Image (cartoon, grey):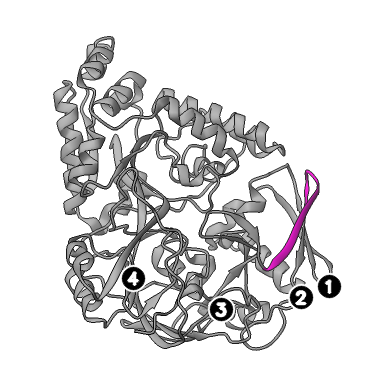
Amino acid sequence: MHITRTRARLTVVATATALALTLAGCSGGAHTGPAASPGSQLTTLTPKGTAEVDKISWNVFQGEPQTIDPYHGADYTPNMINSNMCENLLAQTPDFQIKPNLAKAFSNPDPLTWVYDLRDDVKFWDGSPMTADDVVWSLQHSMTDKTAFYGYLFGSVDTISKTGDHQVTVKLKTPDYLFNEELASYAGVVVQQKFYETNGDKVGTPAVGLMCTGPYKFVKWTQGQSVSVTRNDAYWNKDLPLKVKNIDFTFLTDDSAITSGLLSGQIDGTYNPPTAGLPQLKASPAGKVFNGPAPLEVTLVVANTTGAMGNADVRKALQMAIDWKGIGTTVYGGQGTPSALQTVRAVYGFAKDELNAYADTVKTDGTAQIDAAKKLLAGVPADVKSKEISLVVPQQAETQQLGLAIKAAADKIGLTFKLNVVPATGYSNYLYDPATRGNTDLLYTQFWPNIPNPLDWLGLTAVTGASFNQSKYAGIDDLYGTAIAEKDDKARAKIVVDIEKKLHDEMTPMFPGIDLTNDVWLGKRITGAPAAFDYTFYPWAAYLGGTGK
């Protein structure tokens, strides 16, 4: 079976100024915080808040969004705001579980049918009930609107229809056991049909805003300054604290300004506080930095296989020679964890036991293995290993350090290596535009998937047609197609392990790199936010509450 996933959402390393990078509907962003050191304790949820708070300011580190329409939100900035306003049929929780949400239950009566039983107590902000018609329209819009980002996830869908007052049924053309879980991303977002039909492409703009069901309602968007939301006191999910009444999402991108705002209390909180400001922040009584689990990986992507990177032994040798442990120490302040596989542990999901077992057989502390790499290269034809290998990185302190470390590894084992440093504002062109990329061999990126499922990660990075498969690798297509069509979790997990073994043996289309975690700063008067990386599709701000200080 051949299955194609045609689009990917990824992030491109942090710039010092956290500039938003956008091209062709996909955007690049910044994870500026470090990873937790191996063995350190990670926090899923910060201490619960007990006090009511009238208003807080929360900085969105990547800068001002271009839109807050969830159909076009595919990166940190829009999703961090949208996730508190617009909800999905399913939810991915801070502990990386996928659970019912606007759909209170779902069933799979046969391989080609998914049935969603909807909650009957959900209302849009204007007081009108969420109906099955709204849900059908929302899913069909994602599937059919060519400008909607998540339409690629509907490739196996045949029809979406209302089958009851509070029921929607999706019929598939071929079995797809990944599709259901993808409805915990904005593939499963539910919006008000009437609002979208009335406002068209103005939805998500400062003039119009949104109409959704989430715990916070859109109030206004002051361009260049903030997006303001207020608590939805009619919100259906009474299990969420909802202690904060009003939130201003601000758009500061300058590291010094963000750090000063956090220390002074002008900004109450932020995800990914500036790396440069972390020593001050950690030492300050004005708040606290928490570190949580995340499905984030700094990695090298094989972008061209016509040169030296077309040889598996060259790829393996370079990977072995890179001092990933040293990179974790130098570039990520001693807190980067070398990856065992191309897919990170936080997204092992249904295959957790099987992938953990396999990962343990190939795990490494990231120490460079120069002699072993040279030995492997000895069997490579001279005309192959003499070809120049090029790596492009954005012009940022961290990425340039990383690039220099990789060049040093290549030099030590006798490879011809060229490091190209390009302006950060144009770096996304190398990821998405073949003309810009040319014959570049390797690209730097930081990747995160839609959902905590290894097949989502693989479908975005290693399947023919995926926009983050720049080298057009096709080696797992059949295995991937078999996996998503397999209902049994154990049988599917076995196939996923086979896929990971193949990718690891071939060392393509990604190198295992550095696992990152998530960090959040909470000023002294608020607490409760998830420390885990769960702010792109889940209403994280609903957990916030006051400390009473």
Residue type at the position of mark 1: Asp
Q: Earlier in the sequence, mark 4 or mark 3?
A: 3
Residue type at the position of mark 3: Pro
* SS of the residue under disc 1: loop
Residue type at the position of mark 4: Thr
Mark 1 against mark 3, which lies toward the viewer?
A: 3
The residue that disc 3 covers is: 215
Q: Is residue 160 on the magenta stretch?
A: no
Camera-side residue of 458 and 214 = 214
Instruction: Check whether the beta carbons of the residues at disc 2 and disc 1 lie within 8 A of each other.
Output: yes
The residue that disc 2 covers is: 120
> Could you classify mark 4 by the number of other residues whose Cα lies within 10 Å: few (under 14), some (14-19), or many (20 or more)?
many
Task: Give the distance between the C-alpha atoms of the residues marked 2 and 4, in whole angstroms.
Answer: 35 Å
Camera-side residue of 249 and 361 = 361
The residue that disc 1 covers is: 165
Q: Please tell me which residue is depicted at 58% across the width and 82% down the height of the picture.
A: 199
* SS of the residue under disc 3: loop
Mark 4 against mark 1, which lies toward the viewer?
A: 4
Q: Is residue 333 visible?
A: yes
